[in-house]
Amino acid sequence: MEGLRQGNLGEYALTGRIAVITGGSSGIGAATARRLAAAGASVVVGFNEGAARAEALVRDLPGQGHFALRLPATDSAALKAAAATVQQRCGRCDVLINSAGTTRAVPHADLEALDDALIDRVLQVNVRGPLATIRAFLPLLQASGDAIIVNISSLAAITGTGSSLIYGASKAAMDTAGLSLARVLGPAGIRVVSVSPAAVLTDFVPGRSREVVEKAAFTSPLKTLTEADDVAVAIMGTITHLRLTTGVSILVDGGKHL
C-alpha cells in the first residue's frame, strides 16, 4: 500500500493517479472532478447524456490525462466497454466515485404517486448502477493495489427523509452493500466509503428551489447551506487522509441528523 503514500503518515499523493467519476459532468461529480484534478489526478469524467457538459469540464480541468467517457448506469454492457477503454488508456483505476443518481420529489405519504416506473428507475440507477459499475471496474481497482470506491449516498438513507421514500431506500441499500464490499474487497487493498450529504444546492432534484434547500439547511445546528464543493472536499478527505477508513458512511449535513 505504499503506492499512494506521501510525506506525513496517512496522507496520499494523487499525482498520476487515475480517478473515474460516474455522473461527473455536473453537481457533486463535477465539483469532485475539479478537486481531484487540482490535486494531480487524471480524471475520467463519466456522463450519460451530458456529453457536451463533460467535454467542457475536461477542457477546464487543470493538469493532464483527463477525458470524458460515457458511463450509463443502466447499461452493464456499456459499463464494461467503458472499463475496457480505461484499461487501454490508463491501465488501472485508483479512485472510483459513484456519483450518478436519480430521484423525483414525491410526498412520502402519497403511495399512489410512488408508481412502479419511478421505483424501478430509482433502484436501477441508484443501486444496480453503482454495483454494475464496481463490477465492471473491479479488475482495474485491483490493479491499483491501493484503491478506494466512494459511493455518494444521502442523509435520507439514515433518517428516512429526502425527496421520496424510494430515494432514501435506494441509498440505504447502497450503504449496506458498501459494508459487504468493504469486507470482501479490503484484502485486495480496496476501501469502500459512503459520503452522505443532506440537501445540496444543485439541480439534482427536479423543481427543488434554492429557498427549499436553504430552509432545510437553516434548521440544522450549523445553519449552513451545503454546496457541491463541500461534498467534494469530504470526498477528498476520504481519499487522501482517511487511509484506514472503510465500510462507513460519512455525513456532510451540518448536523442535520441531530
Image (tube, helix red, strand yellow):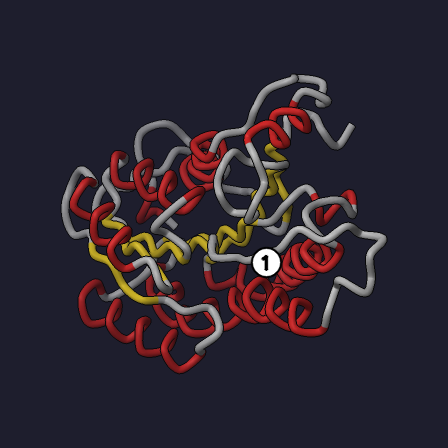
**Observer-nearest of 12 and 9:** 12
Residue 68 location, x and y as percent? 24, 58
What amino acid is labelled 1 in the image? Ala
Query: Which residue carries the number 1 mark?
Result: 182
> Which residue is located at x 24 percent, y 55 percent?
52
Q: Nearer the viewer, residue 54 or 77?
A: 54
195 is higher (above) or lower (below) than 46: above
- 151 or 256: which is nearer to us? 256
Q: Is residue 94 above or below residue 130?
A: above
Quadrant position of residue 75: bottom left
User: Which residue appears farthest toward the right when viewing the image?
Assistant: 109
The residue depicted at 78 percent of the width and 47 percent of the height is 160
The answer to which of 147 and 77 lies nearer the viewer is: 77
Q: Residue 93's x, y, as percent?
A: 33, 60
* Left or right placement of residue 17 versus residue 129 in this view: left
Work out whether 92 lies above or below 97.
below
Q: Is residue 88 above or below residue 202?
A: below
Q: Residue at x 68, y 48 (%)?
A: 163
Image coordinates for residue 101, horizontal then vertical, percent? 52, 57
Most extreme residue toward the top is 222
- The residue at the point 25 percent across, 70 percent down is 87
What quarter of the picture does the C terminus occupy? top right
- x and y percent of residue 81 in the render? 31, 78
